[in-house]
């Protein structure tokens, strides 16, 4: 008897704050269109309010019921959360997406840096127009681990503040195994098959510790290349010759910074997707924030959220051995590529005059051609 693969998927959705509320309906409609094109699948979307505005109204950023739903669903799709004007009493911004990462133990922040044809890109070299590498950011510890335990000590001219970095053996081992496994998959598709550990092992002992664990894990994968680079040199190389990288892996804070650099290489924040992946759960969200400067103007670029949705469909397909849902993800990626390759759309953020509606319409009409 042949086992039927799962056909019905429960998805927790967080439109969040700011432009998140504007781009989420378009993204859900696009997923539905891609699913309909494949046929035989059902995605049940359950949306929850959470984020900075929710915190302002209710005193909590992420309701317990929403967290429970996320824990029990097949995947979570999140637009963006946070508002610079709404903060916790200690001055930190409201960022329940960090709480989700920690509670669901989503240790691998996957940030693909893949350029699309038809949009202006910062690097002049032709190789800079065809980038295709992945940055993996550790997402549960590192320097962000102390975000809840911030304290100011001493007083007067002796006053000081400290944030403590946490790098654990378990955190490193599972992160590096994930990175090598991704590099192996990519090698099968014709990529280089190299993992580069980005650290600051020449200055901080915690990074030296991290690098040693990287070398131990690398030794288990002799068919793949392993290399190291200091974070400052990585920043330089990401601007000068980013095409040299295949899979980069780094600590939480470094990954936060370098992934925005990666978004810049793709043209802008509205073009950069991401996934935060754990053993059983995963949250998919664009790299950008709530963009308070363009709220309500129809200027938000939904592309990064569309790409994140395609990553979600691909991940669900891999988790459940369901090639149909992966095909739906490929349809979304292909429709985005076609839409931009046509040269008929250019988002506001890249100097054009197309906002959420025009970009969504073009992606839908491209999907219809597939
Ligand atoms: P955060 O501080 O959480 O990163 P943010 O929205 O303040 O959030 P970014 O996401 O880095 O910061 O975005 C910086 C700017 O880039 C925004 O203020 C906005 O002008 C622009 N931007 C970001 N995302 C988009 C988007 N999807 N569409 C159009 N413009 C965007």
Image (cartoon, rainbow, N blue to C red):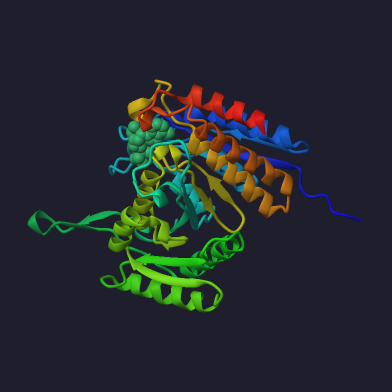
Q: Residue furthest top?
A: 297
Q: Is residue 49 visible?
A: no
Classify residue 12 by image quadrant. Answer: top right
Question: Which quadrant does the N terminus fall into?
Answer: bottom right
Residue 305 against residue 240 in the figure, above or below: above
- Could you say which is closer to the camera, residue 277 or residue 194? 194
Q: Residue furthest front?
A: 126
The mark tally for this picture is: 0
Q: Is residue 251 above or below residue 214?
A: above
Q: Residue at x 31, y 73 (%)?
A: 205
Residue 48 position, x and y percent, is 55, 33
Image quarter for residue 189? bottom right
The residue lying furthest to the right in this view is 1
Q: Nearer the viewer, residue 108 or 72?
A: 108
Residue for point 35% across, 66% down: 199
Measured as percent of width and height from the top left, residue 89 is found at: 30, 40
Task: Find residue 289 and report its horizontal and vertical position in percent.
Answer: 40, 38
Q: Is residue 122 left or right of residue 332?
A: left
Q: Position of residue 103 (x, y in %)?
A: 51, 52
Q: Residue furthest left?
A: 157
Q: Nearer the viewer, residue 353 or 177?
A: 353
Quarter of the picture for ligand 1? top left
- Quadrant containing the C terminus is top right
**Residue at image x 31%, y 43%?**
92
Q: Is residue 328 visible?
A: yes
């Amino acid at each position: 008897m042949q086992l039927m693969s799962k056909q019905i998927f429960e998805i927790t959705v967080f439109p969040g704050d700011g432009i998140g509320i504007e781009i989420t309906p378009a993204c859900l409609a696009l997923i539905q269109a891609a699913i309909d094109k494949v046929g035989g699948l059902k995605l049940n979307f359950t949306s929850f309010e959470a984020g900075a505005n929710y915190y302002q109204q209710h005193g909590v950023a992420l309701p317990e019921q929403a967290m429970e739903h996320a824990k029990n669903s097949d995947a979570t799709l999140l637009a963006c959360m946070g508002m610079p004007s709404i903060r916790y009493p200690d001055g930190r911004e409201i960022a329940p997406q960090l709480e989700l990462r920690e509670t669901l133990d989503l240790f691998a922040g996957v940030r693909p840096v893949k350029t699309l044809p038809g949009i202006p890109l910062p690097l002049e070299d032709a190789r800079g127009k065809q980038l295709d590498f992945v940055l993996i950011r550790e997402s549960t510890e590192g320097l962000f681990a102390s975000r809840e335990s911030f304290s100011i000590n001493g007083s007067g001219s002796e006053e000081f503040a400290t944030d403590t970095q946490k790098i654990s053996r378990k955190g490193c081992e599972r992160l590096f195994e994930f990175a090598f496994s991704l590099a192996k998959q990519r090698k099968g598709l014709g990529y280089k098959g190299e993992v580069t550990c980005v650290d600051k092992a020449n200055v901080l002992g915690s990074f030296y510790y991290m690098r040693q664990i990287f070398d131990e894990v690398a030794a288990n994968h002799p068919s793949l290349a392993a290399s190291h680079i200091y974070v400052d040199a990585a920043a330089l190389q990401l601007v000068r010759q980013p095409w040299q990288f295949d899979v980069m892996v780094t600590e939480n804070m470094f990954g936060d910074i370098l992934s925005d650099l990666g978004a810049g290489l793709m043209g802008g924040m509205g073009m950069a997707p991401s996934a935060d992946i754990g053993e059983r759960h995963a949250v998919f969200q664009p790299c950008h924030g709530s963009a308070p400067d363009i709220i309500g103007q129809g200027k938000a670029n939904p592309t990064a959220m569309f790409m994140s949705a395609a990553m979600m469909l691909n991940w669900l397909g891999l988790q459940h051995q369901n090639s149909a849902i992966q095909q739906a993800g490929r349809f979304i990626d292909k429709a985005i590529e076609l839409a931009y390759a046509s040269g008929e759309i250019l988002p506001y953020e890249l100097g054009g005059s197309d906002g959420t509606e025009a970009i969504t319409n073009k992606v839908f009409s491209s999907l219809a051609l597939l």
